[in-house]
Amino acid sequence: MEMKKRWICLFVENEIGVLARISGLFSGKSYNVDSLTVGTTEDETISRMTISVTSDDKTFEQIKKQLNRSVEVIKVIDYTDIPVHMKELLFARVNNCTEEDRTELFRISQVFGISIIDYDGKSVLFECTQTENKNNDLIALLKKKFINRVEVVRGGSVAVEAISISER
């Protein structure tokens, strides 16, 4: 059984308790959620959830069937193997910086195409809206160069079906 990262998009009724019931469905079956984001759509009665799980094929099929049976779920779309645009919000702060560190961090921000949204004499704060993999690469670099001085805040990924090109 091959375990791999999989993505599901759910359209659900925008009602109190829906998020708890959907996440409860995962925890009740001991499925681990890697990432979950939710927000209202252009129709304020409907929310869109983007969920990432690591599972094998059989388990993933069970997850999709259970989600489809849930009354609050309007539509389930498997994003795993289709072209999508996907971004994750990440804030990363590097603390206890020297002047040399700050210069290096400004260079890193240019290479990665990310914004420095705040800094002072001792810390630099990045805002990144990249793919999960690019954010992972940034975090790995920061942790390697600035050992025990990196603070990370991540939101889950959001995704939409691609029109002509995709970015994952």
Image (cartoon, helix red, strand yellow):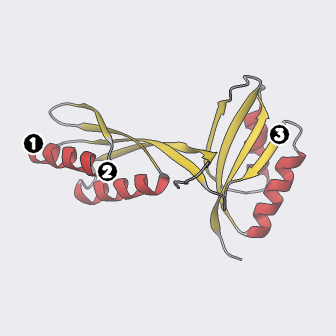
Residue extending farthest to the bottom is 1
Dot 1 or dot 3, earlier in sequence: 3
Question: Which mark is nearer the camera, 1 or 2?
Answer: 2
Report, in whole angstroms, how far the alpha carbon at label 1 lies from the one at label 2: 20 Å
What type is the residue that disc 2 sits on? Phe
Question: Which mark is nearer the camera, 3 or 2?
Answer: 2
Kindly check if marks 1 and 3 are in contact, taking CB atoms under 8 A apart as contact.
Answer: no
Q: Quadrant of residue 120?
A: top left
Q: Residue at x 26, y 56 (%)?
A: 147
Residue with the mark numbered 1 = 99
Residue extending farthest to the left is 99
Q: Nearer the viewer, residue 47 or 42?
A: 42
* Quarter of the image that includes the N terminus: bottom right
Q: Is residue 21 left or right of residue 81?
A: right
Q: Dot 3 lies on which element?
A: strand
Report, in whole angstroms, how far the alpha carbon at label 1 lies from the one at label 3: 52 Å
Q: Is residue 50 left or right of residue 28?
A: left
Dot 3 or dot 2, earlier in sequence: 3
Q: Dot 1 lies on which element?
A: helix
Q: Residue at x 70, y 51 (%)?
A: 8
Q: Position of residue 158 (x, y in %)?
A: 58, 43
Residue with the mark numbered 3 = 73
Residue 159's label in the rendered image is none
Residue extending farthest to the top is 44
What type is the residue that disc 3 sits on? Val
Q: Residues within 10 Å of mark 2 (few under 14, many from 20)?
A: some
Residue with the mark numbered 2 = 112
What type is the residue that disc 1 sits on? Glu
Dot 1 or dot 2, earlier in sequence: 1
Q: Dot 2 lies on which element?
A: helix
Report, in whole angstroms, how far the alpha carbon at label 3 lies from the one at label 2: 37 Å
Q: Nearer the viewer, residue 89 or 83?
A: 83
